[in-house]
Amino acid sequence: MSNSHPFKLMDSLPASTWQSTISFCPLPLVSILSAVNSRLRNRLRALPARRASVDLSFQLRLTDSAFSAICRTIQHQSVLELNLEECKQLSDASIQFIILHFHQLRSLNITGCRQLTVGALRDISTLHFLQRLKCVRCSGLGTEVLLQIGRCTQLLELDISSLLPCRALMDTTDALRNLRALTTFRANEVPLESRIAFLRDLKSLRHVEIRNSGGFDDLEGLEHLEYLDAFSNDISSFTTLTSSKDCLLHLDVSYCGLYEFQGLTLFTNLQFLVISGNNIHCLDFCSSLPKLETLLMNDSALSPSTFSLQPLVNCPLLHTLGIAFWRRTELDLRPLASLPLRLCSAEESKVVSIDCFDHPIQWVSYSDLLKLCGVEG
């Protein structure tokens, strides 16, 4: 089948030949409708013996009628994953059809579907196998959406980033306390503030992203937390994370107005640490992080009289370092000569002794380093 065809049927998981993916390339609506012909219909109807992932993302002109036509060619019970990201013309009717007929659905992505209202997810709790729900930038869902989501007690992953522009809506966050199986929670750009306390009841959480959300003073008790992205939050100390000290591997507290980092000495298993945009007096706390592999502290305010890279010698696994935009402090890299550094950003920094390493280092820009590390700018 040609790559330009609006339907592509392929085996996406080599180890599981029973799973197929149906994706729709971003073509005009007329192409999508004309593609629902007898030949493709026969191929799609052969899916019940398989398990399918249907990707309709970025079909900007996909209407309810076109979606209905596509659904008539698919055996609903075979669909495990459905991606409707940025299908901006879909209404509540399409989502209600999914809830009514796609009983085996495990994953649903309705990111950017701005026409949806609170009625779209009214009966979502009837999808008893749903494990992953992503509804980013769905501002029309209304104040009851969390009450509806809170009834999906089997959910493992939930992303409500940029979902809730109304502060009054956050009074319903307690409804999420019932998601006891949840392992991944993303609420970036959501004004959680003091209402984040409900997370303490979700003891299975391993991955939390709350960028620009107000703070995380109520995360005590998450004993299995491995990943925390708290970019640009109001943080007073790390004591609220002490219950996660043995399992936390990835921590981003960049641009949080921090002056003190000694509290990090308890997190001896940290592998990835981002403290960019803070006030860094010294790196003594790094002496207690022997497993640290990546340290990003770009665009930080330093104390020239007390700052030194010497403590990083106690991080023998350190291979990625971000020290960009340190304009007022001269950085001597000689203490790091014994480390396996491979990737470094020192853009606009006063760095000396760059030639002290006996192995090649890739010097990249600040923005490229963030991309290579999978960190949002």
Image (cartoon, rainbow, N blue to C red):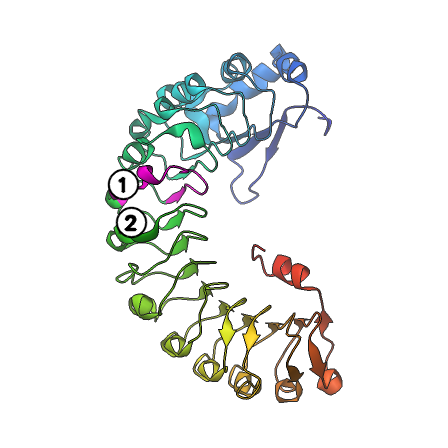
Quarter assignment of residue 147: top left
**Residue 195 has which mark?**
2
Q: Position of residue 317 (x, y in %)?
A: 55, 78
Q: How many marks?
A: 2
Does the magenta segment cover residue 28?
Answer: no
The answer to whether 108 appears left or right of 298 in the picture is left
Q: Which contiguous range is marked in magenta? A: 157-176
* Secondary element at tag 1: helix
The answer to whether 268 appears left or right of 45 in the picture is left
The answer to whether 367 appears left or right of 307 in the picture is right
Rendered residue at 61%/82% (across/down):
339
Residues at marks 2 and 1, CA–CA distance in whole angstroms: 7 Å
How packed mark 2 is, by other alpha carbons closer than 10 Å (few <14, some 14-19, many 20 or more), is some
Q: Quadrant of the N terminus?
A: top right
Q: Position of residue 373 (x, y in %)?
A: 59, 61
Q: Quadrant of the C terminus?
A: bottom right
Please tell me whether residue 66 is drawn above or below residue 255 in the rendered image.
above
N-terminal label among 2 and 1:
1
Rendered residue at 45%/52% (across/down):
212
Please tell me which residue lies in front, 349 or 240: 349
Q: Are marks 2 and 1 in contact (CB under 8 Å)?
A: yes
Q: Position of residue 328 (x, y in %)?
A: 65, 78
Please tell me whether residue 34 is drawn above or below residue 145 in the rendered image.
above
User: What residue is pinned by disc 1?
Assistant: 171
Type of amino acid at the residue the image marks with label 1: Asp
How packed mark 1 is, by other alpha carbons closer than 10 Å (few <14, some 14-19, many 20 or more), is few
Type of amino acid at the residue the image marks with label 2: Arg
* Secondary element at tag 2: helix
Does the magenta segment cover residue 175?
Answer: yes
Q: Is residue 223 at least partly visible in the picture?
A: yes
Quarter assignment of residue 223: bottom left
